[in-house]
Amino acid sequence: MTDVTGAPADVLHTLFHSDQGGHEQVVLCQDRASGLKAVIAIHNTALGPALGGTRFYPYATEAEAVADALNLARGMSYKNAMAGLDHGGGKAVIIGDPDRDKTEELLLAYGRMVASLGGRYVTACDVGTYVADMDVVARECRWTTGRSPENGGAGDSSVLTAFGVYQGMRASAQHLWGDPSLRGRKVGIAGVGKVGHHLVTHLRDEGAEVVITDVREEAVGRILAAHPKGVSAVADTATLIRAEGLDIYAPCALGGALNDDTVPALTATVVCGAANNQLAHPGVEKDLADRGILYAPDYVVNAGGVIQVADELHGFDFERCKAKAAKIFDTTLAIFARAKADGIPPAAAADRIAEQRMHEAVAGRSL
């Protein structure tokens, strides 16, 4: 079923009526000459211009792409609020296979689309896009971050994303075991790409045992070659989450990793990873709590990357960004404390804190 615009009715219902909606603006972009088909979603600008990455992915349908953009943009509002940034939440998705469809002409066309929003949305890298891509986009759009240092940017944001997740793990250990050290802990990482491989290094440097899996054999091989001791691999995520003696599970690939099938099978007592939108649907956070599994909210612990790209807008300084990302440790502990005090799961506690900050920003404007 579609409405008069030709958009699937369930997408429009999500946008205007559901709890997953409430977005300020959604832009459908097309450039037939380059083949560009994209969705830019702006969820909330109470704290400032929307900031979030551009995902390049071969969605099965346009409706799936729109739904992903909406969910990701909403998550960015909460992530930016919890990171203490003066930015709202936005996200963009480009429909297509980045290995086959990505061209300079397409990226330039996309840059013009972002520029047409006049700064309401600031873009950066995400799944399927890289620093070199943002350099191209920036030729048409000054509201572009995640560029190369040679072009005035901060470079690869996955470095601080991984550092922030590592701080979230340390905070989880402090809360659960009374000691932030991860030495001797067994950590399972699903996805060892841009972020995951940096995370492995942090964990091995501290003396943690690491078990990895990835759908790409070359990614697994690269990690095993770099870390011949203390790192092992398993065939798939289903095997990883059932690994004996696992202390921490880190989903670092695509969203929806925590669902009705995986949560009952988890052997870990902590979930703390880099993937966005890890909770497949509302209620999963309670299922985790009921099983005694401590969940470090994804958009809190993976905020190191957005901290980095936001700083780029003001003249990038890595040490300043790293100091901000280190505060993810304190923020995560504060969420656990709020959750205990309110008798709610950590995900709900994080939402309350983020919503309070956005509400206060709106209230402050009206004074």
Image: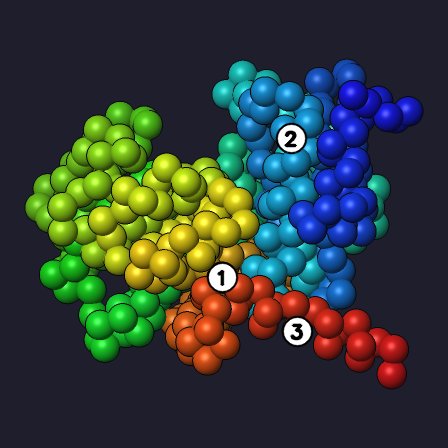
Q: Secondary structure at mark 2?
A: helix
Q: Secondary structure at mark 3?
A: helix
Q: Earlier in the sequence, mark 3 or mark 1?
A: 1
Residue 72's place in the image compared with 314, above or below, is: above
**269 relative to 44 in the view: left or right:** left
State whether residue 189 appears in this view: no
Q: CA distance from mark 2 to mark 1?
A: 25 Å
Q: Amino acid at mark 3?
A: Gln
Q: Residue furthest right?
A: 4
Q: Amino acid at mark 1?
A: Ala
Q: Quadrant of the C terminus?
A: bottom right
State whether residue 213 appears in this view: yes
Q: Secondary structure at mark 1?
A: helix
> On the image, which quarter does residue 204 sit in?
bottom left
Foreground residue among 157 and 277? 277
| Coloration of the structure image | rainbow
Q: Amino acid at mark 2?
A: Ala
Q: Residues within 10 Å of mark 3 (few under 14, many from 20)?
A: few
Dot label at residue 65: 2
Q: Earlier in the sequence, mark 3 or mark 2?
A: 2
Image coordinates of residue 75 in percent, x first then y, are 59, 53
Foreground residue among 134 and 125? 125
> What residue sits right under mark 3 in the picture?
356
Dot label at residue 347: 1
Residue depicted at x 19% and y 51%: 246
Image coordinates of residue 88 in percent, x first then y, are 69, 60
Q: Residue furthest left?
A: 229
Q: Quadrant of the N terminus?
A: top right
Q: CB atoms at circles 3 and 2 under 8 Å apart?
A: no
